[in-house]
Amino acid sequence: MNIVLIGINHRTAPVEIRERLSISDDKMGEALCALTADPCIEEGLILSTCNRVEVCAVVKETHKGFQAVKQFFARSHPDIAFETLDPCFYMYASSNAIRHLFRVASSLDSMIIGEPQILGQIKEAFDHAVLHKTTGLVLTKALKKAISVAKRIRTETKIAQNAVSISYAAVELAKKIFGRLDKKSALLIGAGEMAELAARHFVNSGVESIAIANRSYDRALELAKTFKGIPIKFEDYASEMIKSDIVLCSAGAPHYLIKPEEVAKAIALRQNRPIFFIDISVPRNIDPKINDLDNVFLYDIDDLQVAVETNLESRKKEALKAEDIISEEIEQFARWFKSLDAVPMIIAIKDRAERIRLAELGKITSKLGELSPAQLQALEGLTASIVNKLLHKPLTVLKAEVHSTNGNMILEATRKLFDLKEELSPAKEEEKNP
Amino acid sequence: MLNIFFFKATLIFYFLGTLFFLLILSWDQRQGTGAPSWTQRLAVIVTGSGFLSHTVALAIRLKESGYVPLANLQEAVSFFSWAIVLIFFWVEFKYHIYILGSFILPLAFLSLISASALPNKIPDLNPTLVNTLLGIHTTLSVLGIVAFTLAFIAGIMYLLQEKFLKSKQLNTLYQRLPPLDQLDQWNKTAILLGFPLLTLGIITGALWAQYALGSYWGGNNSKQALSLGIWFFYLLVLHGRITIGWRATKAARLAIIGFVGVIFIFVTLA
């Protein structure tokens, strides 16, 4: 048994691949079931955000597990050639996988170090997995630990200070285009969480009015209330563009919503007043060609990455402290995780039984006085057979059940019943590597 | 000739200022930390020294000739150079946009060096009505040209900043250049100021021609035609901005085109 983590993120794959691999909320259940259908995979969790698609799984065998997860990706995306997908993957096993998970949750692996959204996304991914019963003992513990580590890092380091996020980067860019934002108006297309967050940044920076277009009008209405904005019909977004200086798109449409012709028309009607488009949807909803038009500035999620890199330097220093915290926490977790493995556990139980047997045998032979070699042999045989018969059933069940669905629970229970903390101390463990 | 000594000193200072400011410009354009702060300080100090010595040179000249020293082309060009450096300092102190120096200093140096190549003879003019008119005409025209030069620089900075924003090269220069909207405002304000100055300059020029040469339209004809053409061009630019929205990128490009025409006036005069 081992923990593996396979995925792609903004560093290994371009947005073109990420947007195709991303799994929407409504399809998450299906995907989780498909993932755990493989006999090699015992527990599974899928994290799908704009910047990453990752599978964290507990597998019977590391190598087979890697293959199984890769096959899951290949099967669910037959439209992408595996040759293009394969080099984008990163793969981690055991403590490296845990480290990656902790780093992701603590936002050390994020595009913007210290950004707060990822933790919420991890919680969501975990909720999905719990709902579809694809998590077990190991992943539950790992995820809970990841969340607590992330919180610890947030409070103990300055990693989340000087709020830098994609939305903040967008506001900074808007200021470089418009100077002051207090007489500017923004248009929100799509009212997801990301859009809401970005809108909040813009409102806090002084944007005067904000129009909200969303497929669900009720949600637009709701958001309009929070921002004192104007809800508009989703179909009206193109005409609203004429009045808007900033267009924030996160509509989640499967194709381009905003096309060069519409934008050119809007700019002409605006008498060449610039428009700043921010496309935070994956897949992208704004045709990248509009950036070639005069007075149009388009930034997609990848571009914003470049924009914030300069601000990241100070956070990188804090990240070093965070890495230390993670190393510390990993040690604890790894100790627990390795104690779950059946083989060292069986050896430990046998060792202990043998020690007890020899000690008791020693006591009784000294009390009985002189014994013939035949008698001694008989005593030896008796004690050994009692110990073996007592242990035989539990140990065979342990061996057999360790790879079953509730194997980890049995291991955990065994560890507790026999109180094996001492025997399974980290000094005796070897590093598990793929 | 003390003023010539100061004039030459100014040339050297402006040359060094240009060198430092261009160095800063090329440093800032690369990714990374940009120009170190000592170059900035040095550039401003050298330029400041140049400006002081230029002011002294102009003051001596004023004292020697006894009238506003704008009677010949060399003086006009020298005054132009002085005025744009003055504006650099004003912007630097008010808005702290010292990167403007990287655009103004090369122009100041080039105009000063071309001025030094021009004949430097103080014409024997009496402070009569005709000559006062000539002085007013030249002053207004030069101030108008200064305004158009600023519109040109705002235009260049606009196109640069636009290029950085569009190509997503967010380097140090991008950080130092002002927001696009501000540059567009500068462009607009400069042309709005420059246009009436040019208008008055042309009118006083025509009046002077009437008195001195006996005809509104005479003497250097190509210059007058060109001035009129440029006047129409800027009229069109202003009209376009107000009515059909020639702003932002278009306004920046137009300001650059207009400035090329302005340079031609100098060329025809020389």
Image (cartoon, rainbow, N blue to C red):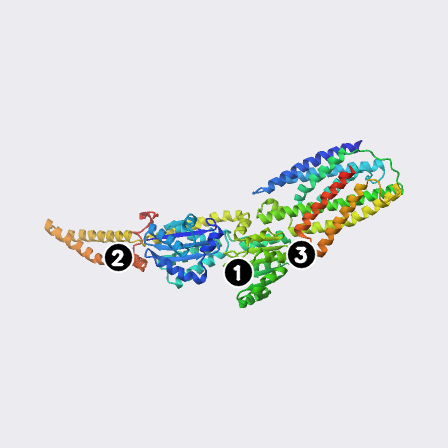
Circle 3 residues within 10 Å: few <14, some 14–19, many ≥20: some
Dot 1 or dot 2, earlier in sequence = 1
* Residue drawn where x is 52% and y is 61% of the image: A192
- Mark 1 residue crowding within 10 angstroms, few (<14) / some (14–19) / many (20+): many
Q: Position of residue A67 (x, y in %)?
A: 35, 51
Chain letter of the residue beneath label 1 in the structure image: A
- Judged from the image, the secondary structure of the residue bearing numbered disc 3 is loop
Foreground of the two, A256 or A307 = A256
Exactly how many numbered labels are in the figure? 3
Q: Disc 2: which chain?
A: A
**Which dot marks residue A271?**
3
Q: CA distance from mark 3 to mark 2?
A: 76 Å
Label annotation for residue A251: 1
Tag 2: Cα neighbours inside 10 Å, few (<14), some, or many (≥20)?
few
Instruction: Identify the residue under disc 2.
Output: A400
Which numbered mark, 3 or 1, is in the foreground of this view? 3
B219 sits to left or right of B89: right
Nearest the viewer among A13 and B233 is B233
**Residue A180 point in image, percent of width and height:** 64, 55
Up-down: is B82 above or below A83?
above
The amino acid type, in three-letter code, at marker 2 is Ala
As shown in the figure, which amino acid type bears the numbered disc 3? Gln
Residue A416 position in % (x across, y down): 30, 58
Q: In 3D space, how far apart are the residues under numbered discs 3 and 1 (Cα atoms)? A: 27 Å
Left or right: A95, with B162 as reference point: left
Q: If you read the primary sequence from the N terminus, does the residue marked by circle 3 or circle 1 appear first? A: 1
Q: Chain of mark 3?
A: A
Is any atom of residue B260 visible in this view?
A: yes
